[in-house]
Structure formats: C-alpha cells, structure tokens
Image: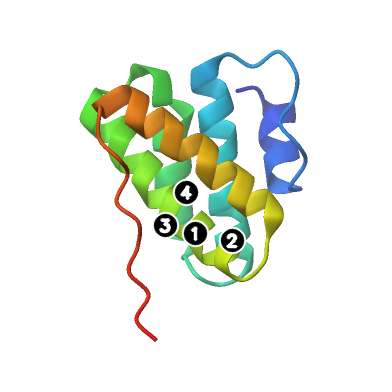
C-alpha cells in the first residue's frame, strides 16, 4: 500500500479501487486496527507493530498471514456484534480469505454473556 492508501485506512475510507488481493486484505485489517487504536483497545506500540506486519503482508508466510487475519477478524466480530455493518462485511471477507488460505473455518471469538 502507498501512503495515500494508509491515510485512507486511518480515515476509515472504503477500499480503494485497483488493489490486489493481498493489499485489499491488508487494507481491511489496517482500517480495523486503526479503528481499535482510536477506540483505545490497542496501544500505539502494538498498532505500529501490526502496521509493520501488514505493510509486508504479501511477503509473510502463510501462518503469519493467517494469524493476522484471525487477529483482525476478532476485532471486526466485536464491532459487527454491536451493529457495525461495515465490520460485518469486512469480517466476511477476512473469513473467506482465511478459509481459502488454510482450508479451515476461522475461529470465531467466544463472547460469554
């Protein structure tokens, strides 16, 4: 992703046209991570580390990419459960990518009541 796309993710903008599949997934995850940082759920240090991984997403091994998908999926599920329709749509994209990559269903977070 370029700097303009990173700024767009920070601002919660829709996925830019023309991204390849890896950049599209990284964009969705980065947008989710930024949202969680702004909400105070993750620290700046953790966010920067994850952003670094996402900037190299296409170069990472399958296990690392799958872990990032699951990490972001967890945040998106929480938001989707609170009624965020964009988070629901994004979680479905990440779940499909995880399944295509691993052949397994992504583990849904448990939310005891």
Q: Residue at x 47, y 48 (%)?
A: 48
Numbered label attached to residue 74 = 3
Q: Which residue is mark 1?
A: 77
Q: Which residue is mark 2?
A: 80
Q: Residue at x 58, y 38 (%)?
A: 28
Say which quarter of the image contains residue 2: top right
**Residue 8 pos. (x, y %):** 75, 38
Residue 63 placement, left or right of 15 = left
Q: Is residue 37 visible?
A: no
**Residue 86 pos. (x, y %):** 69, 50
Say which quarter of the image contains residue 90: top right
Does the CB distance between marks 3 and 1 fall below 8 Å? yes
Q: Which residue is mark 4?
A: 48
Report, in whole angstroms, how far the alpha carbon at label 3 lies from the one at label 4. Answer: 18 Å
Count the numbered circles shown.
Answer: 4
| Circle nearer the viewer, 4 or 2 | 2
Report, in whole angstroms, how far the alpha carbon at label 1 lies from the one at label 2. Answer: 5 Å
Rendered-image quadrant of the N terminus: top right
Q: Residue at x 75, y 18 (%)?
A: 17
Report, in whole angstroms, how far the alpha carbon at label 3 lies from the one at label 1. Answer: 5 Å
| Circle nearer the viewer, 3 or 4 | 3
């Amino acid at each position: 992703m370029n700097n303009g796309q990173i700024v767009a993710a920070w601002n919660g903008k829709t996925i830019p046209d023309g991204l390849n599949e890896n950049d599209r997934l990284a964009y969705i995850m980065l947008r989710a991570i930024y949202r969680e940082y702004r909400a105070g759920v993750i620290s700046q240090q953790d966010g920067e580390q994850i952003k670094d991984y996402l900037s190299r997403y296409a170069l990472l091994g399958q296990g690392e990419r799958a872990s990032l998908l699951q990490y972001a999926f967890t945040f998106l599920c929480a938001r989707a459960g609170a009624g965020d329709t964009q988070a629901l749509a994004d979680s479905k994209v990440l779940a499909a990518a995880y399944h295509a990559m691993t052949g397994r269903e992504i583990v849904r977070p448990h939310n005891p009541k």
